[in-house]
Amino acid sequence: MSTPDLNSRPRLAPGCRLSETSKPQRVLLMPERALRLNGPSLEIIERCDGNHTVGQIVTELQKRYSKAQPEKVESDILGYLGRLHDQRALDFD
Amino acid sequence: MSTPVPNPLVLVAELTHRCPLHCVYCSNPLELTKRENELSTETWARVLGEAAELGILQVDFTGGEPLARPDLTQLVSAARAAGLYASLITSGLPLDEKRLDALSSAGLDHFQLSFQGAHRESAAKISGTETHAQKLSVARWVKQRRMGLTLNFVIHRENLGELKDMVRLAEEIGPERVEFAHVQYYGWAFKNRMKLLPTREQLAGSLEIIRQAEERLRGRIRVEYVVPDYYAKYPKACMGGWGRKVLLLKPDGDALPCHAANVLPGMTFENVSRRSLRQIWYESDSFQKYRGEGWMPELCRTCDRRGQDFGGCRCQAFLLAHDSGSTDPVCSKSSQRVLVDAILADVDAMARSEAATAVSPPAPAPDWVYRANPR
Ligand code: SF4
Ligand code: SF4
């Protein structure tokens, strides 16, 4: 699995987008697949907009989930982004 | 014991049976829907709305060749307006940049381009047409517009030797995703199966090529490989299980749980011009018929894998064992597995005699059954 660089700016790859906000269950839509997004996963994906760096996403989520261990939050996010990158759902610019 | 019926997630919209190609493995039915029986733009638009309400997330526009529908752009708009993810599954012709722009502005999310081979000559032999150069241009145009791109290589014994070149071609084009899918043996491909099935040895070689490609391309191109299940120990879940995930509409509006379901005897299908998608999904006989476990033979009903493969493919059970309610003959637990093994043994023998003809007088190879062009 690829580990994302903290300075890169992830954005959704061509062919991937978030489902509309009007639907109760948000999903990440991609070719032949849809990934259910809940709580943190949605908050991460919403920040994959080509503006936030990986490092910023980590810091913001560490603040939001201040009760969790910061290292754990970071490694979870890096793992999640790396997996999505390998599935070609994300580009790292 | 009956578990609630899940809502469908995918709508496969076969817009037309018209197609400029004549592939030897085409899964289109042998009897093609005539143009005047195709659903209208308005009906499709209504159906797409109903699909989204039912909980469907994605629509695959396919055919035949969906580009043969002049109203394709309108249908993509209707899909997006309903909140669906819109995919186009196409051979890439007839298409020019202007039309692609229109499709892109209408919100087409994903473009799946099918290839018949890595080279012009082999592709022409399979599809009976010259299309290779056009496909390369189309792939380039799609990438320029930042739409999702999947390349789909349909593979079989005749072109399996080109697999490495196909990987190289994919690497050059650089889509997000590439799919190498062995032909499924229904429709035309079932008639041609002796010519299309790879030998066990060829299959093993191809698996190694794919494994290496996956590793090398990780993070750049997602590689997917669909093997012919004749070589597997257990069958595949046909369409994710009968009436569990996919709803397929024929050009005339008939609703099917699986794209080959119309070969099954005694099945009648509801049509979207008379019933709503919701009624069809939850109530129609055809979707109920092999849904759940009630229909299963003892062998499957008592098997741990029933929640994974749902007893396999009904069409395969019918085509091979002549009983659509039996365990898929691919399953190694089935007494009918001998039927599949006999086919594989024949394939092996034929491949060996083909190799022998290099030094001896040519033996007649089976002729392709070409598909006649629908009007
Ligand atoms: S398999 Fe070939 S001939 Fe059949 S519909 Fe697809 S592109 Fe057309
Ligand atoms: S017996 Fe039926 S459920 Fe079990 S593996 Fe075979 S086909 Fe699947």
Image (tube, coloured by chain):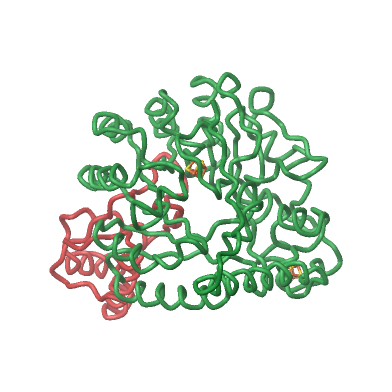
Q: Could you tell whether A82 is left or right of B356 in the image?
A: left
- Residue A66 lies in what quarter of the image? bottom left
**Which of B250/B104 is in front?**
B250
Percent x, y of residue B204: 51, 78
Residue beneath the point at 75% across and 65% down: B329
Residue occupying the point 43% across, 78% down: B208
Residue B356 sits above or below residue B72 on the image? below
Residue drawn at x 15%, y 55% is: A51
Q: Quadrant of the C terminus of chain A?
A: bottom left
Q: Is residue B183 left or right of residue B344?
A: left
User: In the rendered image of this protein, does residue A16 appear above or below residue B56?
Assistant: below
Q: Residue furthest left?
A: A7
Name the residue at 36% across, 36% down. Answer: B93
Q: Nearer the viewer, residue B31 or B40?
A: B31
* Chain letter for the red part: A
User: In this rendering, does residue B85 appear at all?
Assistant: no
Front in this rendered view, residue B311 or B193? B193
The chain assigned the colour green in the figure is B
Q: Is residue A4 above or below residue B103?
A: below
- Classify residue B259 as left or right of residue B221: right
Q: How many marks?
A: 0
Residue B268 image position (x, y, % from top left): 77, 35
